[in-house]
Amino acid sequence: MIKIIITGPECSGKTSLTKSLATFFKASMVEEYAREYISKLDRKYIKKDLLEIAKIQLKSEKKLKNKKIIFCDTDLLTIKIWSKLKFGECDQEILQNIESRKSENHLYILCKPDIDWVFDPQRENQFDRDNLFVIYKKQLEEYGFNYFVIEKNDRLNKSIKKINNILKI
């Protein structure tokens, strides 16, 4: 199985791109669980909520382990970055899960935040997206994850072309 994870700062087109790619490749998709989880809270989220989100996100991915290709709208790396920015640290279980998955067959698509920001009550970083992009890129490189950056217009067709080139290998 190859797992393709679409990641990047908030409001950079991740969800739209993930859905479009899953449709194009007739593949399964793992939705970002954080949005659903937080929308059900009757309080502000806290650090331990991120661990719960991570656990459900992993379960969703594991349910599809027998598929040839899956597309993930973010993953634990996003939760790590989010946790460090919001709370100054990240739960060890999340960090261990990221570390243990380094040998998996996956590809990250890092979305550049060069599209308009749209208000959403769960979004917190309207003016910090470029700095977040740098953090994502640095994390991908530090873990040695295979990735490419997608930017500007025609993101879907550019992504399809890159993925097709990789799948031919």
Image (tube, rainbow, N blue to C red):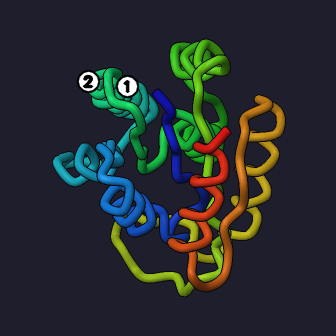
Question: Does dot 1 land on a helix, a strand or a loop?
Answer: helix
User: Could you tell me residue 102's position as x and y percent?
Assistant: 66, 21
Quick one: label 2 or label 1, which is nearer the N terminus?
Answer: 1
Question: Does dot 2 land on a helix, a strand or a loop?
Answer: loop
Q: Nearer the viewer, residue 58 or 20?
A: 20
User: Could you tell me residue 54's position as x and y percent?
Assistant: 40, 29
User: Could you tell me residue 25's position as x and y percent?
Assistant: 38, 54
Q: Nearer the viewer, residue 125 or 141?
A: 141
Q: Residue at x 42, y 44 (%)?
A: 72
The quarter of the picture where residue 23 lies is bottom left
Q: What's under tag 1, amino acid-wise? A: Leu
Find the distance from the CA under tag 2 to the CA under tag 1: 9 Å
Q: Residue at x 39, y 32 (%)?
A: 68
Image position of 144 (left or right of 106): right
Q: What's under tag 2, amino acid-wise? A: Lys
Image position of 119 (left or right of 105): left
Q: Nearer the viewer, residue 26 or 75?
A: 26
Image position of 125 (left or right of 121): right
4 up-or-down from 66: above or below: below
